[in-house]
Amino acid sequence: MLTTDVTESVVREAQAKQCRLVLSHHPLLYHGLRSITGKTEQERCVTEAIRCGIAIYSSHTAMDNYLHGVSGRMAEKIGLEAYRILVPQPVQPDYDVRTGGPTRHAQYGLGVIGKLPEPVPFARLLAHIKDVFGAETLRYILPKEDKVQTLAMCGGAGSEFMEAAIQQGADVYISADFKYHGFQPAVGLIGVIDLDHWVSEHFTREVFAELLAGKVETVVSEADKSPVRCYLQ
């Protein structure tokens, strides 16, 4: 079963659909457990998975740091061309995980940057991103110019990479979990679009499915949803 988060609903769904492995983006446990009493959802997930014989594997930082992972899939959905790593890792493997062949291009690092086929009004970009990602709401800072073309992005909480986006000439930076004061350095320098964390990363399920195609049977969780809701009146 492919999922963004491991929750009780996801584990129950995996059991009902006879899945023996849950492959998630976010880890079930960010910190070790000192006890398993069932008081928290994480503890109950562990108990239920063990009881049902379901293994759990989480990719997280591996998928965060791959060119065609979290951020790369965001770029593809938006329509960026020739995107590349925004913040490269100092050491690069000599093979491409996607093709299995050699590569001389940086495949590993955080975030990506690329260009749209042509400049578009910022309002159109906002509408496009809201539609593509299925976002209920978007928070944003206006760009210097109304028409934008060079976009940088990082799936999940990536506000700390906004400076890299500015230095590399991006018109807009797209990520999640911006704090109020994290927005302020962008004013007059770069546009910012703040997505819900889950919304920015849920396409990892597609990446998992493509990597595993023809190797094992997979099913995308229907219970995997963002726990965050917006009040719209």
Image (cartoon, rainbow, N blue to C red):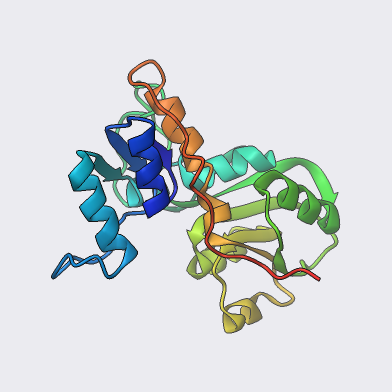
**Residue 136: percent from left, percent from top:** 70, 59
**Residue 106: percent from left, percent from top:** 41, 40
Q: Quadrant of residue 34?
A: bottom left
Left or right side of 122 for 9 = left
Q: Is residue 83 visible?
A: yes
User: Which one is in front, 120 or 21?
Assistant: 21
In the figure, 97 relative to 161: above or below?
Answer: above
Residue drawn at point x = 77 percent, y = 48 percent: 128
Image quadrant in which the C terminus is located: bottom right
Residue drawn at point x = 85 percent, y = 61 percent: 146
User: Which one is in front, 222 or 195?
Assistant: 222
Q: Is residue 68 visible?
A: no
Looking at the image, the residue that sits furthest to the bottom is 181
**Residue 163: percent from left, percent from top:** 55, 69
**Residue 186: percent from left, percent from top:** 66, 74
Image quadrant in which the N terminus is located: top left
Residue drawn at point x = 42 percent, y = 34 percent: 208
Q: Quadrant of residue 41?
A: bottom left
Q: Quadrant of residue 37?
A: bottom left
User: Which one is in front, 182 or 45?
Assistant: 45
In the figure, 45 relative to 107: above or below?
Answer: below
Looking at the image, the residue that sits furthest to the left is 34
Left or right side of 135 for 20 = left
Left or right side of 1 for 156 = right
